[in-house]
Image (spheres, rainbow, N blue to C red):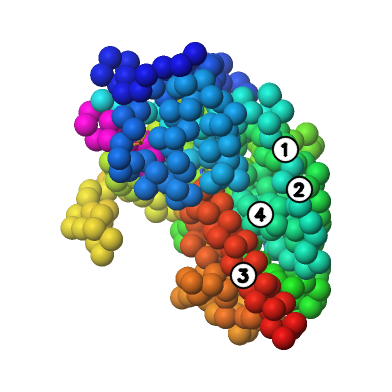
Amino acid sequence: MTRKMLQFTHLPQRQPDKRAAALRRGDFHEISLGFDETRAGDQSSRCEQCGIPFCSLHCPVGNNIPDWLMLVAQGRMEEAYAASSATNTFPEICGRICPQDRLCEGSCVLEQSSHDSVTIGAVEKHITEHAFTQGWVKPGLPLSELGHSVGIIGGGPAGLAAAEALRRRGYGVTVYDRHDRMGGLMIYGIPGFKLEKPVVERRIRLMEDAGVVFVTGVEIGKTQSFAELRARHDAVLIATGVYKAKPLGLPGAERPHVHAALDYLIAQNRRDLGDAVAELDAKGKDVVVIGGGDTAMDCVRTAIRQGAKSVKCLYRRDRANMPGSKREVAHAEEEGVEFVWMAAPESISAEGVRANRMHLGMPDASGRQSPVVIAGSAFTLPADMVIAALGFDAEDVPTLFAAPDLAVSRWGTVEIDPQTQMTSLDGVFAAGDIVRGASLVVWAIKDGRDCAQAIHRYVSAKTAQAAE
Ligand SMILES: Cc1cc2nc3c(=O)[nH]c(=O)nc-3n(C[C@H](O)[C@H](O)[C@H](O)COP(=O)(O)OP(=O)(O)OC[C@H]3O[C@@H](n4cnc5c(N)ncnc54)[C@H](O)[C@@H]3O)c2cc1C
Ligand code: SF4
């Protein structure tokens, strides 16, 4: 079926239906039911086909959004898949977990003109899911082997996006990861109710079929040296992410019922993947999660699904000033999470979290109003499980890798030359969170793809030089 575009004047926005909150509280499956062909086509036809498409300009990978929306509206699904996959290594993953309200959909002119944006993320997911059912998604096999090899440290989205692009070009690619599974935070951080694990595993299998070699359980800097890796490969990519949890810095933070967010999420993701994990279960407990970002939202929603007695999120600013996605806060509230706004923890005891009420004072250097304690306002939230979700910093990579010449910023992130994507070490590149600090999957994909090109330029130039 073919449809005319610009239907936004009479077709209202309809995001995919969600499973009822009462149902989704009981499992870790995705909450969105996705589009069928008719809804995807209708919603795509709302697009105005802007001459300057702000949706694409605000997409980190520069997706040709108006093109694939028009193709879906016209029922030309195979071409839509070709356009969508040309700029993004994992479009069905971005369609599920990108914060579209802050990126493409937030910039869509329909959103800006109060017509409600085109449902870009849901259409993106639909295109590739349809492509998988039709058998259009194939391993990225190279036309010929180049005879060069690249070693990639870290099998998260940055490492995997680079691996896919390099293998397609004909490089021998080996990805090393300290975990027992590839995928990085897409497997062990992001919960199944946002991104079911088989969706990531399907991609990893395709890359294996293309000839990418995955080596799990290898921690570079510990079980294998960084110098050895550099000697083995023509180029090396550092894509190790950021994993040092920001400390709570409170009296009582070392108590046994206080847990780091990522330990907690990893335990549940392992259960979802079929591993037997007994610890870190919130069943029957009063849970308090400290923090207001997306990781905190993932923790509160996980605790609800584990059958916690009560789940509270303690955040020192108000709803308008929290860093987490508004959409995720709404999902958490629907599922029964209670938000305690404008309250900051003071200490943790066996009984729970003692906190103070706050008010918002003068804006700080970032422009956000600073929270200030209201004297005499202390109260205690009962808790037998406390989860600290204050974000992540970079580990000390130069020390871990015994590479003191690897330049890092004052935050510990690895510095790269923006033109060449190369670090201060010859032939060593870096991508993803370890360069940007904690960020998004889509930025990691962009960095990985950019690095693949940069590595190809570097190896080609070296090879040409050697031949002279
Ligand atoms: C709980 C949580 C929820 C999130 N939700 C979202 C979301 O909904 N949407 C979104 O866009 N982003 C989300 N993010 C952010 C997103 O997951 C990251 O920005 C992204 O995964 C970064 O990709 P990366 O490849 O740089 O690093 P990672 O995904 O962290 O992968 C790095 C890999 O390197 C490996 N590694 C590290 N050191 C070594 C070493 N020395 N040797 C071998 N291997 C090593 C690690 O085991 C890991 O597998 C979330 C993050 C968290 C923590
Ligand atoms: S900004 Fe919105 S209306 Fe314009 S091209 Fe992009 S999706 Fe279509």
- Count residues near mark 1 (Cα–Cα under 10 Å), then give few for <14, some for 14-19, many for 20+: few
Residue drawn 71% across the image and 63% down it:
152
Q: Give the side of residue 86 with respect to residue 313, left or right.
A: right
Quickly name the residue at label 1. Answer: 138
Q: What residue type is labelled 2?
A: Leu
Mark 1 lies on a secondary structure that is loop
Height in image: 3 above or below 97?
above
Q: Main secondary structure of the magenta part?
A: helix
| Residue 141 image label | 2
Q: Which amino acid does label 3 sit on?
A: Arg
- Count residues near mark 4 (Cα–Cα under 10 Å), then give few for <14, some for 14-19, many for 20+: many
Quickly name the residue at label 3. Answer: 457
Quickly name the residue at label 4. Answer: 165
Residue range highlighted in magenta: 102-114
Q: What residue type is labelled 4?
A: Ala
Q: Earlier in the sequence, mark 4 or mark 1?
A: 1
Residue drawn 78% across the image and 64% down it:
146
Between 30 and 385, the residue placed more toward the observer is: 30
Percent x, y of residue 84: 53, 38
Q: Nearer the viewer, mark 4 or mark 2?
A: 2
**Is residue 32 visible from the viewing direction of this image?**
no
Is residue 107 found inside the magenta-colored segment of the image?
yes
Marks 3 and 2, Cα distance to the nearest angstrom? 20 Å
**Is residue 82 visible from the viewing direction of this image?**
yes
In the image, is the residue at mark 4 within 8 Å of ligand 1 by its beta carbon?
Answer: no
Between 466 and 59, the residue placed more toward the observer is: 466
Q: Quadrant of residue 127?
A: top right
Q: What residue type is labelled 1?
A: Lys
Q: Do the residues labelled 1 and 2 touch (CB within 8 Å)?
A: yes
Residue drawn 31% across the image and 29% down it:
48
Percent x, y of residue 211: 81, 51
